[in-house]
């Protein structure tokens, strides 16, 4: 039995220790915003925060999240500048990769609200978007910085 703290709520989950955290979040807990893409830790669409740090939940066993804090796309408030900027700039196309992108961008601005263009591009380029929304993603992160009042 594993104990997880997801978006501020406690869950007790009965699963094999090697079960990927992604499946526990989606199937056991029922939060389906986090998506399955490659299953190999490459595309980033399954990203969630573990103790505030982005991880690829498709290759993270549930055992490593025992008694830890997890934040999923559902745990980021819609009033947060990052989500507001995403909506304002209509970033998503098909939308499939976007939960992972938003979670990564949210963590980046928590870590470094004043992240430079180079840093934003470098961090976000670890996520694949087959619709090619990279340009809008960069603009949305920079828009969020303005909404947060850290850049003019
Ligand atoms: S589904 Fe996890 S990195 Fe692609
Ligand atoms: S918006 Fe379609 S894969 Fe990124």
Image (cartoon, helix red, strand yellow):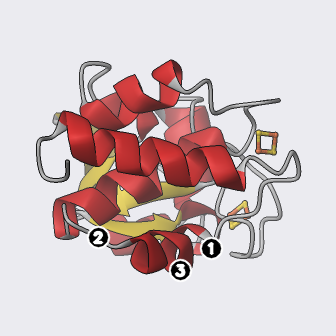
Picture quarter with the N terminus? bottom left
Going by the image, does 58 lie left or right of 76?
Answer: right
Tag 3 secondary structure: helix
Q: Residue at x 66, y 65 (%)?
A: 127
Residue 146 image position (x, y, % from top left): 24, 41
Check disc 2 and report the residue beneath it.
115
Instruction: Note whether 43 is above or below 97 in the view shown.
Output: below
Going by the image, does 148 lie left or right of 137?
Answer: left
The quadrant of the rendered image in which ligand 1 is seen is bottom right
Q: Which residue is more in the foreground, 151 or 32?
A: 151
* Mark 1 residue CB less than 8 A from any atom of ligand 1: yes
Question: Would you call the spot at circle 2 few (<14 residues within 10 Å), some (14-19), or many (20 or more)?
Answer: some
Q: Which mark is residue 91?
A: none
Q: Nearer the viewer, mark 3 or mark 1?
A: 3
Residue at mark 3 to residue at mark 1: CA–CA distance = 22 Å
Question: Would you call the spot at circle 1 few (<14 residues within 10 Å), some (14-19), or many (20 or more)?
Answer: some
Instruction: Note whether 97 is above or below 129 in the view shown.
Output: above
Q: Residue at x 82, y 29 (%)?
A: 94
| Label 3 or label 2, whichever comes before in sequence order | 2
Residue at mark 2 to residue at mark 1: CA–CA distance = 28 Å
Check disc 1 and report the residue beneath it.
59
Going by the image, does 116 lie left or right of 35?
Answer: left
């Amino acid at each position: 039995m594993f104990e997880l703290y997801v978006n501020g709520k406690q869950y007790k989950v009965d699963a094999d220790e090697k079960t990927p955290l992604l499946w526990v979040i989606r199937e056991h807990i029922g939060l389906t915003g986090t998506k399955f893409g490659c299953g190999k830790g490459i595309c980033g669409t399954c990203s969630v925060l573990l103790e505030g740090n982005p991880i690829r939940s498709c290759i993270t066993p549930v055992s490593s999240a025992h008694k830890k804090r997890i934040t999923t796309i559902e745990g980021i408030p819609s009033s947060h500048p990052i989500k507001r900027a995403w909506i304002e700039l209509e970033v998503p196309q098909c939308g499939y990769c976007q939960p992972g992108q938003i979670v990564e961008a949210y963590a980046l601005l928590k870590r470094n609200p004043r992240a430079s263009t180079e840093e934003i591009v470098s961090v976000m380029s670890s996520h694949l978007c087959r619709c090619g929304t990279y340009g809008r993603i960069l603009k949305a992160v920079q828009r969020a910085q303005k909404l947060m009042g850290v850049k003019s």
